[in-house]
Image: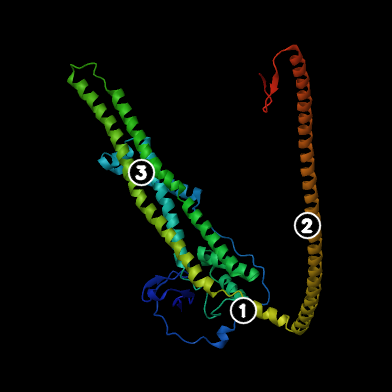
């Protein structure tokens, strides 16, 4: 819901559940109670038709301050000043246990106190920045009175409204992110590109916020380490001052024990101070980090739930485009019909050509198949005849050989018969035997 600050008349915005809460105006810092939500009413025709924005206007934006990181030199100077002032304030209480822990335990305790104070100063500066971010979230950055939807026609008026906000408040995470998204929408008129830009800007803000705690994390690590260094230093002093050479002298023994306990006091007090300071510092640091992350989450939710649903990238642009080409629609329709008719004619001719080519190809394939089959059959018959001839010729030669061999044996038998010898008989298997 939207309302006005009763002190400075600044346009503000809050959720309905915040009605009745006491808040602080981000413009004049005055405190007032959030009014109840007004009754819903119809949006007037004048409000729905916002001022036309003919063409995108180039805007230079404004210089953005780092919302998370504090000035290193300023925080260091304030930390040194507070540390020195604190130690000087303890001088009147010198001799007490608390004062001696800070003043009589050497340079280690001074370093621990300085790092602790410097870290607290950084947290204070960050809290001041986070408070301003929280205040900026009360601003009515997207007034519904301009238009219930943000289109290419009225986005310029919404951006101009952002530029009219107070300088101290418009340089905030939420206003900067919304301004960048609307300026991109004004140039590109595309919801998806705006959504991608908002998501990328959210990641950048989160990374910057997380990185701003790097130095504080170093302090949380260094303070206990300094305590352990002081422990080693105190033990070294205690052992070095322990002199039991004159054990018979009670005063000497008493002095040696005093030096020993003094060294042990330095050892334990530095560790105690380091652990206590680091523990105290960790609580506000965790609370501050949680608060900044919640602020980023609320800004992401506002962009997702309030900004993106109101962006309309189609209605106005498509209407102007249709009106611009309305006169050419009949001619375009005739051209389209003529092109369609020509396409059908060409398609019919191409179909006939493909049919003739298919029939010709089929005839050639049949002829080729017949030729191949005849050639193959002739080759097989010729190969069979040649094989038969090649097998018949050795058989005839073998028969002639056995015939001539039989004649020779008959001649030999006749000769042996005349001589009265044995007769040689040739068996069917071709082996020789005597009878």
> Compared with residue 94, is residue 403 higher up or lower down, i.e. above or below?
above
Q: Farthest residue in the top direction? A: 419
> Compared with residue 23, is residue 78 higher up or lower down, i.e. above or below?
above
329 or 52, which lies in front?
Answer: 329
Q: Position of residue 27 (x, y in %)?
A: 48, 70
Q: Which mark is residue 87?
A: 3
Q: Quadrant of residue 94?
A: top left
Q: Which mark is residue 345?
A: none
Q: Residue at x 61, y 77 (%)?
A: 154
The answer to whether 257 appears left or right of 126 in the picture is left
Q: Assess disc 2: are there few (<14), some (14-19) or many (≥20) residues with their C-alpha within 10 Å of its C-alpha.
A: few
Looking at marks 2 and 1 on the same chain, the residue that comes earlier in the sequence is marked by 1
**Local secondary structure at mark 3:** helix
> Compared with residue 297, is residue 257 higher up or lower down, i.e. above or below?
above
> Compared with residue 200, is residue 151 higher up or lower down, i.e. above or below?
below
Q: Assess disc 1: are there few (<14), some (14-19) or many (≥20) residues with their C-alpha within 10 Å of its C-alpha.
A: few
Looking at marks 3 and 1 on the same chain, the residue that comes earlier in the sequence is marked by 3
Q: Mark 2 and 3 residues: CB-CB less than 8 Å, in contact?
A: no
Can residue 81 be spotted in the picture? Answer: no
- According to the image, label 2 marks what residue? 369
């Amino acid at each position: 819901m939207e309302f006005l600050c009763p002190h400075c008349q600044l346009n503000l915005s809050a959720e309905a559940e915040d009605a009745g809460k006491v808040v602080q105006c981000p413009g004049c810092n005055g405190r007032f109670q959030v009014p109840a939500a007004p009754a819903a009413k119809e949006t007037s025709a004048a409000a729905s038709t916002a001022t036309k924005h003919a063409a995108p206007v180039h805007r230079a934006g404004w210089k953005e301050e780092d919302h998370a990181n504090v000035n290193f030199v300023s925080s260091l100077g304030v930390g040194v000043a507070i540390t020195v002032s604190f130690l000087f304030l303890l001088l009147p209480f010198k001799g007490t246990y608390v004062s001696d822990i800070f003043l009589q335990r050497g340079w280690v305790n001074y370093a621990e106190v300085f790092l602790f104070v410097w870290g607290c100063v950084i947290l204070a500066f960050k809290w001041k920045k986070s408070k301003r971010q929280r205040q900026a979230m009360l601003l009515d950055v997207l007034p519904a009175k301009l238009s219930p939807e943000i289109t290419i026609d009225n986005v310029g008026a919404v951006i101009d409204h952002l530029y009219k906000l107070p300088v101290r408040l418009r340089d905030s995470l939420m206003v900067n992110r919304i301004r960048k998204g609307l300026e991109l929408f004004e140039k590109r008129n595309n919801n998806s590109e705006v959504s991608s830009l908002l998501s990328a800007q959210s990641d950048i803000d989160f990374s910057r916020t997380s990185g701003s705690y790097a130095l504080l994390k170093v302090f949380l690590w260094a303070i206990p380490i300094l305590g352990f260094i002081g422990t080693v230093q105190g033990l070294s002093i205690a052992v070095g001052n322990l002199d039991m050479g004159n054990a018979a002298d009670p005063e000497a023994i008493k002095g040696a024990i005093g030096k020993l306990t003094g060294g042990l006091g330095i050892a334990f007090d530095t560790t105690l101070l380091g652990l206590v300071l680091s523990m105290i510092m960790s609580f506000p640091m965790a609370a501050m980090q949680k608060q900044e992350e919640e602020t980023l989450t609320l800004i992401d939710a506002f962009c997702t739930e309030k900004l993106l649903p109101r962006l309309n990238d189609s209605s106005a642009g498509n209407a102007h485009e249709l009106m611009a080409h309305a006169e050419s629609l009949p001619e375009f329709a005739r051209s389209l019909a003529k092109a369609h008719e020509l396409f059908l004619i060409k398609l019919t001719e191409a179909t006939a050509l493909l049919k003739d080519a298919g029939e010709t190809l089929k005839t050639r394939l049949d002829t080729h198949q017949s030729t191949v089959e005849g050639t193959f059959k002739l080759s097989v018959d010729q190969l069979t005849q040649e094989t038969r001839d090649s097998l018949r010729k050795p058989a005839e030669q073998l028969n002639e050989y056995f015939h001539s061999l039989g004649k020779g044996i008959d001649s030999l038998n006749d000769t042996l018969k005349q001589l009265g010898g044995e007769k040689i008989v040739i068996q069917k298997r071709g082996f020789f035997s005597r009878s």
